[in-house]
């Protein structure tokens, strides 16, 4: 027994007679018991908790998940970016808890142990540490919960304390809010993201089913009781919420501006949102009174390397993959950097089709871009993007056709190409400028056609460049004019490319490509005999190359051109071989043009059901690049007219495809145009006047994506008064009826499983259905 041992209750020295005990008398023991009993009162310590004065909006699924995870795991970390509403959600979660809970606000403190000591109401223990006092207090309660709010600036200290508390207090549960997890054994991380966002074209009734819009309305009404979301402002409110990534803090700050700005005015000013989104409640933490301060708190906690990465990535302005990030950040492998930034809630990870990309929330990006401007990083990043683009393109310029993996890589990072094109033009780096134009010509997006704009191509052709680069660029210019029906211009550019290749032998791939393009031009400018000769030379060049994809593309072009000149029987074996090669290569995105040719041959042979099946398959496999599919809409329409099964749908599809052709100046070959004209004439003869106009109007109003969905589901246009759900929701419902999982549907449609789940939920809500099985039954009854 040490000389300075003392009673835990009164502090009087303990005598030898009571050695080994904690109390000097029964009175002190009973007093300690009464204190413990009082402390075990199951009502939470409400006085220590934030007391929100506004309403809590949404997050029903998140609250349910927190309740479940909190019962299953002793350490739960609620993480998310600045302004995601972590603290508010934690308060709402704990307010429903009946057991003892303590709230520890760590944002203004640096000593974690002292903050917890005061939060739990611990008492000093003689000759014992503060940690021991905390453990002694916590261990007296039956099911205690400790909430540690805003831990990111003292993460290591929090991890150390929490680890010890959980080890010493087996009944304790801990809820942490932070912008990154503690990374402790047994930790369950709950990532808090954006509020549910409505589709861009939602009406007021639909928009108000989404938490982001409800939050905007609620906070706007709190400062302007006359405000309401209606038909006059719903599109602007939805656009504001979507532009702010569904982040609660940003939406709240934007909504408070309706006292002096309309939603349209707020939307117009979001380009300078860091200046606009200020003026949070006076009682709010300083970090939550402006959007800039909220993001700056996270940025200032980063290491120098992490801050530089945030600045460099912000210059991109588009999603990026690991390879791009490594190049832009100037490291061999940026995996650790990206992992760290993602864990700190400064990057969002998107996974789709087996590929991972990263992006910054727009508000975070704008903040970091400001820092990039201050640091003079813009030119550095632009030069690194140019280096990356050229490193991808240059190894492929001697090929007949760039490797699909290269095209896919460029497609996934197509947003970077504009930056690379502008930078090389600005610096007069014309050889590399040509490579950036070639990259642009190889790519496509869901919103635009494949290929570089005419003015970019022609401007680049006026610049000095190596002969090999010029050959590739002139053949790309020829292909550009080919799809627009400019056959004489196509012929001129193709002849120039061929002359370069014949003079500079040794590139059979680019020589074969020049021959192929020139052959198609000769066939359409009155010299088919020369065309067949050029095609045969190209086929011979590639016969022993081992490049099966190049051979498939060439054979398909040869077959398509033969068909245009009335030779379907000669075209059929060429296209059949091309189709076999592409299927064997396992490249579904390359099937589209070959299936189109096969479908056109079936049409020529009047095998209309076969043609319908081929064009349907082409529409299904081509969803990654819908701009390539207007031909398939026309082909399917021709097949339907031939079968005579659905003239109205056929006319709608023909009209929708015609809109695309007009918008991008795509001219059909004379052979194909004649079939389109004949089909329209037949439809107009066989459809009554009223239904005829309705069919054409439907086609005119549809986007290309809607037309494709309509073609595959045989349902009306999204938003049609007779359709209770959108075309996309209907398409998802039909796939549910086929028994596909959300992941399988997402892979089929090129969207995330989370987005699929949202479509399923919205469709069920609109239809008043309570289960996925009921939705499948409904879809089976309403689709052919």
Image (cartoon, helix red, strand yellow):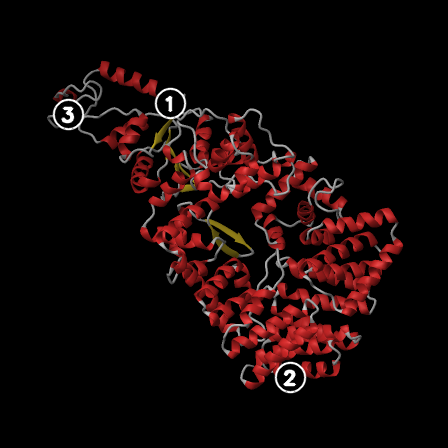
In the displayed structure, does residue 573 sit left or right of residue 331? right
Give percent across and percent down for residue 688: 88, 49
Find disc 2 in the rendering and name its residue. 540
Which mark, by number, is residue 539?
none
From this viewpoint, is residue 3 visible? yes
Classify 404 as above or below 650. below
For the residue pair 558 and 227, the one nearer the viewer reads as 227
Q: Which of marks 3 and 2 is in front?
A: 2
**Horizontally, is 149 left or right of 492 in the view?**
left
Considering the numbered disc 1 on the image, is that residue within a helix, a strand or a loop? Answer: loop
Q: Is residue 135 visible?
A: no
Q: Distance between the residues labelled 2 and 1?
A: 84 Å
- Tally of marks: 3
In this figure, which residue is indicated by the disc labeled 3? 5
Badge 2 or badge 1: first in the primary sequence: 1
The answer to which of 257 and 763 lies nearer the viewer is 257
Position of 620 relative to 771 (above/below) = below
* Number of the label disc, if any, that sits on residue 45: 1
Q: Residue at x 48, y 59 (%)?
A: 419
> Where residue 493 appears, x then y in whole percent?
62, 76
Distance between mark 3 and mark 1 Cα atoms:
32 Å
Q: Do the residues labelled 3 and 1 touch (CB within 8 Å)?
A: no
Residue beneath the point at 45% across and 58% down: 322
Which secondary structure lies at badge 3? loop
387 or 618: which is nearer to us? 387
- Tell whether 66 sits left or right of 570: left
């Amino acid at each position: 027994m040490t000389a300075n041992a003392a009673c835990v209750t009164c502090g009087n020295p303990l005598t030898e007679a009571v050695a080994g005990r904690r109390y000097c008398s029964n009175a002190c023991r009973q007093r300690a018991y009464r204190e413990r009993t009082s402390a075990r009162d199951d009502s939470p310590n409400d006085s220590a908790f934030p007391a929100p004065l506004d309403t809590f909006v949404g997050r029903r699924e998140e609250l349910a998940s927190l309740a479940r995870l909190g019962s299953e795991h002793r350490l739960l970390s609620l993480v998310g970016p600045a302004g995601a509403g972590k603290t508010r959600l934690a308060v709402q979660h704990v307010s429903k808890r009946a057991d003892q809970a303590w709230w520890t606000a760590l944002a203004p403190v640096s000593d974690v142990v002292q903050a917890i000591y005061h939060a739990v109401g611990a008492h000093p223990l003689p000759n014992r540490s503060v940690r021991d006092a905390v453990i002694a207090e916590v261990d007296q309660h039956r099911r205690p919960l400790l909430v540690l709010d805003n831990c990111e600036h003292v993460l290591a200290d929090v991890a150390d304390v929490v680890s010890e508390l959980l080890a010493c207090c087996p009944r304790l549960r801990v809820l942490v809010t932070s912008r990154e997890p503690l990374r402790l054994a047994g930790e369950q991380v709950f990532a808090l993201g954006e509020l549910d966002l409505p589709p861009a074209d939602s009406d007021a009734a639909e928009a108000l089913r989404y938490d982001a819009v409800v939050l905007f309305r609620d906070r706007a009404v709190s400062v302007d009781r006359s405000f309401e979301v209606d038909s006059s402002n719903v599109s602007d409110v939805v656009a504001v919420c979507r532009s702010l990534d569904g982040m609660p803090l940003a939406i709240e700050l934007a909504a408070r501006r309706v006292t002096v700005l309309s939603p349209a005015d707020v939307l117009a000013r979001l380009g300078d949102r860091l200046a606009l989104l200020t003026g949070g409640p006076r009682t709010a933490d300083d970090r939550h009174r402006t959007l800039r301060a909220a993001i700056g708190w996270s940025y200032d906690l980063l290491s120098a390397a992490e801050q530089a990465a945030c600045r460099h990535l912000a210059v991109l302005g588009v999603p990026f993959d690991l390879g791009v990030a490594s190049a832009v950040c100037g490291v061999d492998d940026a995996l650790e950097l990206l992992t760290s930034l993602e864990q700190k809630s400064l990057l969002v990870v998107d996974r789709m089709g087996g590929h991972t990309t990263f992006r910054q929330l727009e508000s975070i990006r704008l903040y970091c871009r400001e820092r990039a401007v201050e640091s003079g990083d813009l030119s550095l990043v632009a030069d690194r993007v140019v280096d990356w683009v050229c490193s991808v393109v240059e190894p492929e310029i001697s090929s007949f056709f760039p490797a699909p993996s290269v095209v896919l890589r460029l497609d996934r990072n197509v947003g970077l190409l504009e930056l690379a094109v502008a930078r090389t033009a600005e610096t007069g780096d014309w050889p590399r400028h040509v490579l950036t134009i070639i990259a642009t010509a190889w790519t496509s997006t869901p919103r635009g056609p494949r290929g570089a704009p005419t003015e970019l191509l022609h401007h680049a052709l006026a610049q000095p460049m190596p002969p090999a680069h010029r050959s590739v660029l002139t053949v790309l210019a020829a292909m550009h004019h080919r799809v627009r029906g400019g056959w004489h211009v196509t012929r001129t550019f193709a002849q120039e490319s061929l002359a370069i290749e014949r003079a500079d032998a040794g590139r059979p791939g680019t020589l074969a490509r020049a021959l192929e393009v020139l052959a198609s031009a000769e066939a359409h400018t009155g010299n088919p005999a020369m065309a067949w000769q050029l095609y045969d030379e190209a086929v011979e060049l590639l016969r022993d190359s081992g490049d099966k994809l190049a051979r498939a593309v060439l054979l398909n072009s040869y077959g398509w051109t033969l068909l245009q000149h009335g030779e379907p029987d000669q075209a059929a074996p060429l296209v059949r071989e091309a189709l076999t090669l592409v299927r064997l290569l396992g490249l579904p995105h390359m099937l589209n043009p070959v299936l189109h040719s096969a479908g056109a041959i079936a049409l020529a042979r009047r095998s209309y059901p076969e043609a319908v099946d081929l064009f349907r398959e082409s529409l299904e496999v081509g969803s990654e690049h819908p701009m390539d599919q207007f031909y398939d809409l026309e082909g399917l329409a021709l097949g339907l007219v031939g079968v005579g099964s659905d003239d109205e749908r056929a006319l709608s599809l023909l009209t929708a495809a015609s809109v695309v052709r007009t918008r991008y100046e795509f001219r059909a070959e004379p052979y194909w145009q004649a079939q389109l004209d004949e089909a329209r004439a037949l439809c107009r003869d066989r459809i009554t006047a009223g239904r005829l106009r309705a069919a054409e109007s439907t086609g005119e109003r549809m986007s290309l994506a809607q037309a494709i969905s309509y073609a595959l589901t045989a349902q009306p246009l999204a938003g049609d008064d007779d359709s209770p759900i959108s075309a996309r929701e209907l398409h998802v419902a039909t796939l549910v009826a086929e028994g596909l999982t959300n992941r399988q549907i997402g892979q089929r449609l090129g969207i995330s499983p989370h987005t699929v789940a949202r479509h399923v939920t919205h469709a069920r809500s609109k239809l008043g259905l309570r289960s996925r099985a009921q939705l499948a039954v409904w879809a089976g009854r309403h689709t052919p």
